[in-house]
Amino acid sequence: MTTASFDVTASFDVTVVGAGPAGCATALAHAQLGRRVLLLEAAHRAPARLAGEWLHPQGLAVLHRLGVDLAPARPVTARGFVLHPEDGGPPITLPCPRGGRAASLHHRDLVTALRTAAGAHPGITLALGARVTAVHGATVTWTHGSGPEHRVHARRIVGADGQSSLVRRLLHPAPAPATTVSRTAGLLLHGVALPREGYGHLFAGAPGPVLAYRLDAGTVRLTLDVPLLPLRGERLLSYVRHAYPPALPGPLARALRAVLEHTPPQWAVNRLRPRGFHGRGRHALVGDAAGTCHPLTASGLTIALRDAECLARARDLTAHSARRAAAVRAHEHLAAALHRLFCDPARPTADLRRGLYAVLRASASERERTMRVLCVEEHSTPALAGAVLHVAARTVRERLAAGEGYRGIADCMGWLRWMSRTPGPVI
């Protein structure tokens, strides 16, 4: 991997702030079109923090088009997800649309592969250890260590620097702040088997959903969605130890209890910021800098890679922003709905959750439709509304059959109104 010498004074077509997956993909996509790109990254090494590790089929397709070689990262192929309801019924298999394949891998290995590809491209100047201090008009100011400031001019400046994006903060008026809805506890389990290898697994029945998937031959990633509780330190760990293992099958439950005895989880805050704004003028945002939805759908990487690819072809950022917002609106609705379905213990939500299980078990077309939205391949909000209506109608019929009358209908109509409203922060 090559990095820039620190006497860069020339102008570039594009300056990208942040060399994570979104930033590297943005640099590669622009460079493929013949643009000269400066890629700036504050860290010298790929991060080891809890971050995106799952690529839906569309995300893998973007990497293939960008010429990124994932072979050294040894990704694990997955056919889709298996949903494990808490109702005691059989698991529900949700294959990737059209027989596609997803992949999971260690985040640091994905970042390394992307930085290697970016550093090797003749149209990209990669500067690691370059901390951006200001963005003003067409000028980016950055430093390397304790060295002098450097100023670089670019026709387009892209913020790919995550949820706390400096580029986004400098835009006026700034986009709406994010809404914090929960926390994710991430753990690595070694030497355990998944209930069905070759799939990611979603377990219901805990205070929040549990997602499990294989990262390599000996390692399974477990992520626990933890409510925002006034607990810290040992009290929070005690809560996790007691509340989450009962929702898991025996081997995973035992492995979770064992690892919590000696290894604290990695924590990440789950913030929701709808992707209605991707920049203006010469300043663009991609990936988490543009917005975030709940990580339950494991879609952040795929959306970020598509952001990058679409931005490179865009001439007008206003039109690009509208297209990208429309492309992920249904997915954002689905992510919010799933989070609410699996976290809300109230009876109306529990009834709808059972309705969801029944519909998915009975209908291959509903399983396909749900996965098209989840994998960010179905962009139609009416398609998602149709799926929700199907679940709600079944729940209404069951409540009417139980003699509950108007109350049963009102609860489901409340869900339909919530799902059909204009996207915004959802808790």
Image (cartoon, helix red, strand yellow):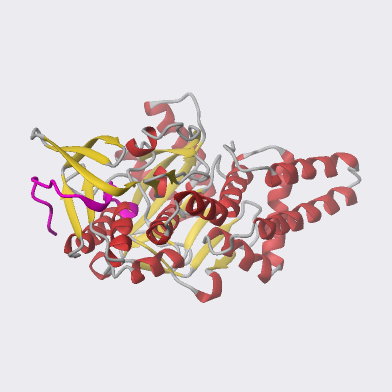
Q: Residue at x 74, y 43 (%)?
A: 417
Which quarter of the rendering shows the N terminus?
bottom left
On the image, the x and y values in percent for residue 216 come to 31, 63
Q: Is residue 70 left or right of residue 119?
A: right
Q: Is residue 401 left or right of residue 341?
A: right
Q: Residue at x 84, y 48 (%)?
A: 399
Observer-nearest residue: 402 or 23? 23
Q: Is residue 40 left or right of residue 263?
A: left
Inspect this view and state whether residue 134 appears: yes
Residue extending farthest top: 230
Observer-nearest residue: 181 or 355? 181
Observer-nearest residue: 163 or 221? 163
On the image, the x and y values in percent for residue 177 come to 48, 32
Q: Residue at x 22, y 60 (%)?
A: 118
Observer-nearest residue: 175 or 241? 175
Inspect this view and state whether residue 91 appears: no
Q: Is residue 75 above or below residue 252?
A: below
On the image, the x and y values in percent for residue 207 come to 56, 39
* Highlighted range, magenta: 1-22
Q: Is 5 one of the magenta-colored residues?
A: yes
Which quarter of the rendering shows the C terminus?
top right
On the image, the x and y values in percent for residue 223 come to 43, 47
Based on the displayed image, in which of its 4 quarters is residue 265 positioned?
A: top left
